[in-house]
Image (tube, helix red, strand yellow):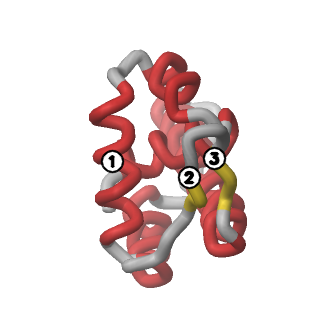
Amino acid sequence: MELRHLRCFLAVAEELYFARAAERLHIAQSPLSRAIKELEDDPGVQLFVRNRRRTRLTPAGHVFQKDVRQLFNAIAQARDNVQSVASGRRGVLLHSLQQITHDFDGLYG
């Protein structure tokens, strides 16, 4: 599971259309579909129900969407914390990206 897979997942989960998600990510639809397939194959769980007309999240997809959003929020917070420490505005780093990704891998890896 890679961050690019998770970015692709969030785009499709938010757009619910592969074409729009691909456009939003500035990639072709084929690599986006491949990334979602790889993501679903990793834990062996279907995250989307797809047909010609629409795409929907499965119950597992809804749970995963919430968790992935939290992960990206934590990554953004970790980046902000590092920048604050580096600029001298903050003396203690609250979260480490390594711990966050380790925890995520423990849940989904």
Instruction: Return the residue found at the far front.
Output: 52
In the image, residue 45 above or below residue 82: below
Secondary element at tag 1? helix
Query: The residue under label 3 is which amino acid type?
Result: Thr
Q: Which class describes the residues within 10 Å of circle 1: few (<14), some (14-19), or many (20+)?
A: many
Q: In which quarter of the image is residue 89?
A: top right
Q: In this view, does 1 lie above or below 78?
A: below
Across and down, in percent, residue 51 comes to 57, 49
Q: Name the residue under label 3.
A: 55
Spatial separation of the CA atoms under disc 3 and disc 1: 16 Å
Residue at 46% x, 50% y is 6
- Report if the CB atoms under discs 3 and 2 are less than 8 Å apart: yes
Point out which mark residue 50 bears.
2
Residue at 63% x, 65% y is 61
Label 1 vs 2, first from the N-terminus: 1
Along the viewing direction, whichever of 24 and 82 lies nearer the viewer: 24
Q: Is residue 94 visible?
A: no
Image coordinates of residue 8 in percent, x first then y, are: 46, 41
Q: Nearer the viewer, residue 29 or 76?
A: 29
Mark 3 surroundings: few (<14), some (14-19) or many (≥20) residues within 10 A: some
**Could you say which quadrant of the image residue 47 lies in?**
bottom right
Q: Which residue shows up at 32% across the image and 62% down it?
A: 1
Q: Name the residue under label 1.
A: 35
